[in-house]
Image (cartoon, rainbow, N blue to C red):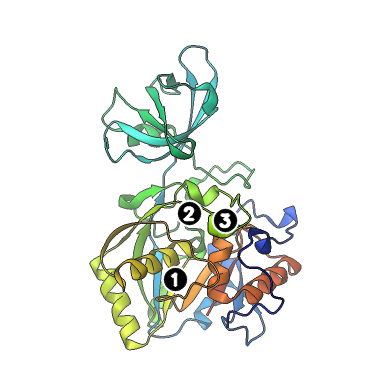
Amino acid sequence: MFNNKNNIDLTKTSSYNYELPKNLIAQDPVKPRDSSRLLVVSRDGSKPFEHKIFKNITEYLFTGDLLVLNNTRVIPARVSGKKKFGGACIEILFLHPDRNNLNKSWIALVKPGKKLPPGTLVTLLDGTEILVGEKLEDGLRNIFFDKTDDPLSVIHKLGQMPLPHYITETHSNPEQYQTIYSNIEKENSVASPTAGLHFTEELLNKLLEKGIDKTFVTLQVGLGTFRPVKVENISKHIMHSELCEVSQNAADLIIKAKKDGRRVIAVGTTVARTLESFAKEFGSVTSGTLDTQLFISPGYEYKVIDGLITNFHLPKSTLLMLVSAFGGYDNIMSAYREAVNKGYRFFSFGDSMFIS
């Protein structure tokens, strides 16, 4: 299944490169959501690729299948301000509350970081003052909200969606970057689990009518999503950590599906990473929370998922490596070439593939 006919060294980051014309990088989502294109790929490479519309996914999901979706919600995390003394413009990307000081401090990325020594005061657009703290690992900083006990309300009031750098057009509707099933109580991500953007209420209802069940897990999509692999030997790459959560109900449904021989379909790489992380850590999917640094690349043996719905990922990215581990390197790279040749739209607002 996981063939590599040309004996390409799959430990090299450059092996996961591909040519992508800039005009294929989607700048806007399609409407309706389920009218995006879908490339259907057999996991073992035994069948030719099929070109469909996403709502046709109903043809490839069977009664008894269990869809697992990530119900995280994206924080409007990008906030602008100015240095209180000097007036220089500052951009802050808030990542998550400081677990040691939940009500007063957030972990963030600030620009220009080199010009913001610890102790710098920044005034946000509504007049709120924040204090830039010490430098942490990976260029991150503590941001202190000394004059409010509700930093998230300030971020909500002033923040904009942290769209990826390759989306250069301005978007007036932030809900375009949220899945329709995102949970406000799980608002903890700085990027969307984009495979889920293709689902509509109508499509989910059709799947339910067909006897396809669904459940939700949560993975907080973090800054590492935007970070490229900077080393040529992928074994040297330090994988970013992300917090994931599985409820008791979700764990029960997944365990029962596996026991019954029914397929577990991951909607997105974040779900795949969550389920495989729990299985690796505990032997099977169980309820609880987990800080995962699992790096999935070819050679990894999947333990939980039987199918994967996923968008098209950046060249040389850990997400492309994860997908190649599931569908086979040759098979997936061939699918990517097919998608480019057929004019599929790539990345967050782009089209998707279903591998099973």
Mark sitting earlier along the chain (1/2): 2
Mark sitting earlier along the chain (3/2): 2
- Of marks 1 and 3, the one in the foreground: 1
337 relative to 93, above or below: below
Element at label 1: strand
Q: Which residue is mark 3?
A: 348
Q: Which residue is mark 2?
A: 239
Q: How many marks?
A: 3
Front residue of 326/146: it is 326
Front residue of 87/303: it is 303
Residue 292, horizontal then vertical, whole percent: 38, 57
Which amino acid lies under the numbered mark 1 shown in the image of this protein? Ala
Quadrant that contains the N terminus:
bottom right
Give the Cα separation between the discs numbered 1 and 3.
17 Å
236 relative to 246, above or below: above
10 Å crowding of disc 3: few (<14), some (14-19), many (20+): many
Q: Is residue 32 visible?
A: no
Residue 80, horizontal then vertical, whole percent: 49, 28
10 Å crowding of disc 1: few (<14), some (14-19), many (20+): many
10 Å crowding of disc 2: few (<14), some (14-19), many (20+): some
Marks 1/3 in contact by CB < 8 Å: the verdict is: no
Instruction: Using residue 257 as the reference point, say whether residue 20 is left or right of it.
Output: right
**Residue 133 figure quarter:** top left
**Residue 219 figure quarter:** bottom left
Element at label 2: loop
Give the Cα separation between the discs numbered 1 and 2.
21 Å
Residue at far left of view: 248
